[in-house]
Amino acid sequence: MADDLKGRTALVTGGSRGIGAAVCRALAGAGAAVAINCREQIGQAEQLAGEIVKQGGRAIVVAADVSQREAVADMVERVTAGLGPIDILVNNAGIAITRGIDDLTEDDFDRTMLVNLKSVFLCTQAALPSMRSRKWGRIVNISSGAARGAGSIGPHYNASKAGMEGLTRGYAARLVKEGITVNAVAPSLIETDMMSGQPQLISRIPLGRFGTADEVAKAVMLLVDNAYMTGQTVALSGGMAFN
């Protein structure tokens, strides 16, 4: 897919590390200019941008809290000014507050919904005008096996990811005639900071190992490359069944 995305601009939320960083590298490798969004990991994001530029790509860092409408509007303006109108949006920003039912607070629930679900709505709404004007767009939402299965984080997290898949299908159905596809990738148990220190979870994976961020990025690229696939969720679960 080298240079297939030349002339395209991508925005990846939560792009400084883990799955987000792997997606940024994959998009840049395919020729896209990449805006790396982060909220706090500015140093890591700048390091990643530097790495992409060194390899001949284009990348900028756009720090913003994607759960806030004004911050999102400002971010989209900065991306458009720095790299051009957004063609590809990867909604990856998320938090995982591990809680049992008895420990789960209203604040935990609200924060999870803001960062994991409202951010997808805000970023999608803000990026859509430029995609619609050019009749081309790719939106990929990073969901989780927890949208359909028990998950290991808590019911608030399940709900946020199930909501994200609902948004995915709702937008896909309404944008299908405008050259814009909307899909989700649902990884389970990927080797990232989120899963560090939980090796006991490997026993639940038939394949016998955690997935990698690069494997998730490959699934994202598959969706970016496919104009006929929309409203779908691609699961990466190492053989774990959810029923």
Image: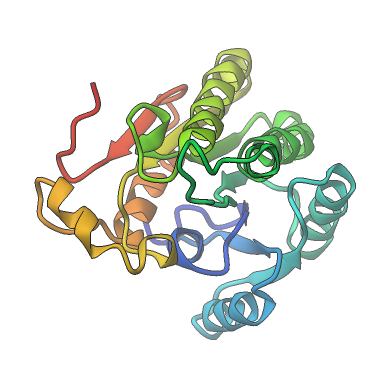
Task: Depth check: give the residue in front, 69 or 6.
Answer: 69
Which quadrant of the structure image shows residue 190? bottom left
For image coordinates 63% across by 21% down, the residue present is: 178
Residue 144: image quadrant is top left
**Based on the displayed image, in which of its 4 quarters is residue 22 positioned?**
bottom left
In which quadrant will I find the N terminus? bottom left
Residue 66: give x, y in percent of width and height: 74, 50
Q: Is residue 164 above or below residue 123?
A: above
Residue 25 visible from this viewpoint: no
Percent across and percent down for residue 10 are 61, 53
Compared with residue 75, is residue 143 higher up or lower down, i.e. above or below? Answer: above
- Front in this rendered view, residue 41 or 104: 104
Most distant residue in the front direction: 102
Q: What residue appears at the point 46 percent right and 22 percent down from the top-left corner? A: 231
Q: Position of residue 217 (x, y in %)?
A: 38, 54
Give me the residue at 76% from left, 38% from top.
Answer: 130
Which quadrant: the C terminus?
top left
- Looking at the image, residue 110 sits to the left or right of residue 222; the answer is right
196 to 106, vertically: above or below: below
Q: Position of residue 224 (x, y in %)?
A: 46, 42
